[in-house]
């Protein structure tokens, strides 16, 4: 079974509803044709708090009943694979202990489309739940995978010459400086100097194992499941957590 997890919140400025409609109309039929046993899970964040991509993916994976051999994908809604892309990169099996960046940033991260077995995602405790707003969660995911010795393989980057051959990607504007708070900066810039004990405690302290959320609607339409969720947001939580991390040596 193949599970594709899309973290979603409708933002008129970014035309996300248009992107989702295109994905369902054009990409889903390809997945159904080529993967056969396939399920799309769209995890929809309620309005109010900043977007939290990592937490939404954690919720999608957590709520999916699966067996050890099922394959999962994180998948941004504005990236649409071609038929040859699905056959070459999505369909082949992946071994336990591997995490594959099918489509990632040209920077040293694991974002966009990432392929894995659920047990490996649980091993690294998924994404950080505290990365609100744009950016950082993909680098943090790579740090977690590296720490737990997963074999990281990368295929296609978002360089235009690479991506255009394999995907139709919608271009959209976003504020890349939004929500670059002190906790994100501390984790991303300070991580290389963390002790092993500190990294272990950090990864264990926030992730899929302790994600907090409430479901407002859970419905299915053929091969698509829509899960509407609310994630509690406290702007002061990051500062409190930063103080805790600073105290760990």
Image (spheres, rainbow, N blue to C red):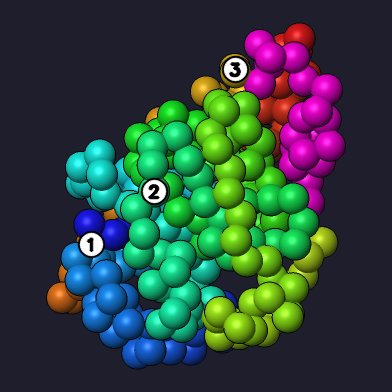
Q: Would you say residue 87 is visible in this rendering?
A: yes
Mark closer to the chain start, 3 or 1:
3
- Examine the residues drawn in magenta and state their main secondary structure: helix
For this rendering, which residue is in front, 78 or 183? 78
How packed mark 3 is, by other alpha carbons closer than 10 Å (few <14, some 14-19, many 20 or more), is: few
Q: Residue at x 61, y 83 (%)?
A: 165
Residue 152: % across, % down: 58, 43
User: What residue sits right under mark 1 in the picture?
Assistant: 218
Question: Quadrant of residue 87 in the image?
Answer: bottom left
Q: Please give the label number shown on residue 201.
A: 3
For disc 2, the marked residue is 94
Question: Is the Cβ of the residue at disc 2 closer than 8 Å to that at disc 3?
Answer: no
The C terminus sits in image quarter: top right
Q: Would you place residue 88 above or below residue 206 in this image? A: below
Side (left or right) of 67 relative to 129: left
Label 2 Cα neighbours within 10 Å, binned few <14 / some 14-19 / many ≥20? some
Q: Earlier in the sequence, mark 1 or mark 2?
A: 2
Q: Which residues are magenta?
A: 178-199
Residue in view at x 78 percent, y 65 percent: 176
- Image-based side of 46 in relation to 225, left or right: right
**SS of the residue under disc 2:** loop
Mark closer to the chain start, 2 or 3: 2
Distance CA(mark 2)–CA(mark 3): 29 Å
Residue farthest left in this picture: 222
């Amino acid at each position: 079974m193949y599970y594709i997890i899309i973290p979603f919140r409708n933002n008129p400025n970014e035309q996300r509803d248009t992107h989702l409609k295109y994905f369902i109309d054009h990409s889903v039929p390809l997945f159904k044709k080529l993967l056969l046993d396939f399920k799309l899970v769209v995890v929809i964040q309620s309005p109010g708090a900043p977007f939290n991509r990592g937490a939404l993916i954690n919720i999608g994976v957590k709520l999916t009943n699966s067996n050890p051999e099922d394959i999962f994908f994180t998948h941004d809604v504005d990236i649409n694979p071609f038929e040859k892309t699905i056959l070459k990169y999505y369909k082949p099996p992946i071994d336990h202990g591997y995490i594959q960046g099918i489509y990632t940033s040209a920077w040293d991260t694991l974002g966009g489309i990432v392929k894995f077995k659920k047990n490996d995602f649980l091993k690294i405790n998924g994404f950080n739940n505290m990365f609100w707003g744009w950016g950082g969660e993909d680098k943090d995911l790579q740090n977690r995978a590296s720490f737990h010795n997963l074999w990281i393989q990368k295929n296609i980057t978002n360089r235009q010459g690479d991506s255009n051959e394999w995907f139709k990607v919608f271009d959209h504007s976003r504020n890349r400086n939004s929500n670059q708070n002190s906790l994100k900066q501390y984790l991303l810039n300070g991580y290389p100097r963390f002790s092993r004990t500190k990294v272990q405690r950090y990864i264990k302290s926030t992730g899929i194992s302790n994600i907090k959320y409430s479901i407002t609607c859970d419905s299915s339409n053929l091969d698509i499941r829509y899960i509407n969720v609310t994630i509690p947001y406290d702007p002061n939580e990051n500062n409190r957590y930063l103080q805790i991390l600073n105290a760990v040596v």
